[in-house]
């Protein structure tokens, strides 16, 4: 005797017709959680689901067991009886929905009564459909197919949304990247500086901004040509990327031969130490055109501002202070960094 004929002749939970759920257009595995307290009815549903081609059938006789199985196994669909010992099916449905924030698993309620109020309460509790026992296999398979189509459509939408999000991220990265140096461009720097000001304000941590300018770069271009000038900017870009070793440090091309460094959680004394190290690294790399004399030395001047941001701190004000400090560094002889707050440059600090 087949499972279908057994359930039809001995159990009122389900009628048998031999319909199948699996088909060439739905070959992927599909799991169903059956929540039914009566063993005979549960067995009949399980047998019919397996006969219909469902790859995995999970069983629970009460709401607590169902919730635990749902959390651990994450089935593709839930067949949920309304009348259960202890908490009823409505309670179970609400708990299932709370257990999957941002996701959706189809829930089909089962009941021996064709009652409009039961249907309404089931939908309100988070259910998606309703079947009256005894369940006809052809109706069960139709419901499974419908729910699977909806589930597949949702998964495709989630996948497409994820791909779109990644594409947007890559587009933003391209929009915020300087094509010559590979550093963040002015637009990206403005956004990141705003974000770091807000973060430092929340955390009560110091934030340092540096504006750097290649000394006598116009003379460099006039002497060695713009192609060598571009190569020089690329080398400096690599150097600035290398010195930004912490995850939130940002090196940006501010414009032309000007660069910017955003250094979160960097106090004034630390910013001066950083600036001295940057100058030493630039000297050690000996960036120069092939036809430049051996004693040629590329140098940087920089302006530094450091603060613990508050509600009145703005990116524009920080940029203005750093720019004033940069002007002071150039006025005092170039090849140095000047701190707006300390009113001291790295040459003076080295002599202390």
Image (tube, grey):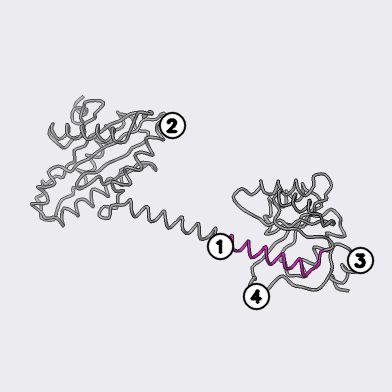
Q: What numbered label is drawn on residue 156?
A: 1
Query: Counting residues from the N terminus, which is met first, the one under dot 4 or under dot 2?
Result: 4
Q: Which residues fall within the magenta stretch?
A: 135-155
Query: Counting residues from the N terminus, which is met first, the one under dot 2 or under dot 3?
Result: 3
Query: Counting residues from the N terminus, which is met first, the one under dot 4 or under dot 3?
Result: 3
Secondary structure under tag 1 reads: helix
* Residue closest to the far right: 10
Q: Mark 3 points at which residue?
A: 10
Q: Mark 4 points at which residue?
A: 24
User: Neighbour class for label 4 at 10 Å: few (<14), some, many (≥20)?
Assistant: few
Residue 57 percent coordinates (x, y): 75, 61
User: Neighbour class for label 3 at 10 Å: few (<14), some, many (≥20)?
Assistant: few
For the residues labelled 1 and 3, the Cα–Cα distance comes to: 41 Å
Q: Name the residue under label 2.
A: 202
Q: Quadrant of the N terminus?
A: bottom right
For the residues labelled 4 and 3, the Cα–Cα distance comes to: 32 Å
Would you say the magenta stretch is mainly helix, strand or loop? helix
Relative vertical location of residue 1 with respect to residue 208 in this rendering, above or below: below
Residue 121 percent coordinates (x, y): 75, 49
């Amino acid at each position: 005797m087949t499972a279908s004929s057994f359930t039809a002749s001995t159990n009122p939970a389900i009628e048998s017709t031999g319909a199948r759920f699996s088909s060439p257009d739905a070959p992927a595995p599909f799991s169903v959680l059956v929540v039914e307290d009566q063993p005979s009815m549960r067995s009949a549903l399980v047998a019919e689901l397996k006969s219909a081609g469902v790859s995995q059938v999970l069983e629970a006789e009460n709401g607590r067991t169902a919730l635990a199985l749902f959390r651990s196994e994450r089935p593709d669909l839930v067949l949920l009886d309304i009348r259960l010992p202890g908490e009823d099916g409505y309670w179970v449905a609400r708990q299932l929905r709370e257990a999957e924030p941002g996701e959706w698993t189809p829930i089909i309620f089962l009941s021996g009564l064709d009652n409009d109020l039961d249907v309404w309460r089931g939908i309100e509790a988070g259910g998606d459909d309703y079947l009256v026992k005894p369940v006809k296999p052809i109706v069960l398979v139709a419901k499974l197919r419908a729910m699977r189509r909806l589930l597949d459509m949702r998964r495709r939408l989630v996948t497409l949304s994820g791909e779109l999000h990644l594409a947007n991220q890559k587009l933003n990265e391209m929009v915020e990247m300087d094509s010559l140096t590979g550093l963040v461009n002015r637009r990206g720097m403005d956004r990141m500086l705003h974000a770091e000001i807000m973060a430092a304000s929340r955390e009560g941590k110091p934030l340092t901004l540096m504006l750097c300018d290649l000394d006598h770069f116009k003379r460099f271009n006039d002497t060695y040509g713009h192609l060598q000038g571009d190569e020089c900017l690329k080398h400096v870009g690599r150097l600035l990327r290398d010195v930004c070793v912490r995850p939130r440090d940002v090196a940006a091309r501010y414009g032309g031969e000007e660069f910017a460094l955003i250094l979160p959680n960097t106090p004034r004394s630390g910013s001066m130490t950083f600036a001295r190290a940057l100058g030493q690294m630039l000297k050690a790399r000996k960036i120069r055109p092939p036809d430049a004399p051996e004693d040629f030395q590329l140098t940087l001047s920089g302006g530094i501002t450091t603060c613990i941001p508050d509600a009145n701190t703005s990116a524009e004000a920080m940029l203005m202070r750093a720019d004033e400090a940069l002007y002071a560094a150039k006025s005092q002889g170039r090849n140095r960094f000047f701190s707006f707050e300390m009113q001291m440059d790295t040459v003076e600090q080295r002599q202390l």
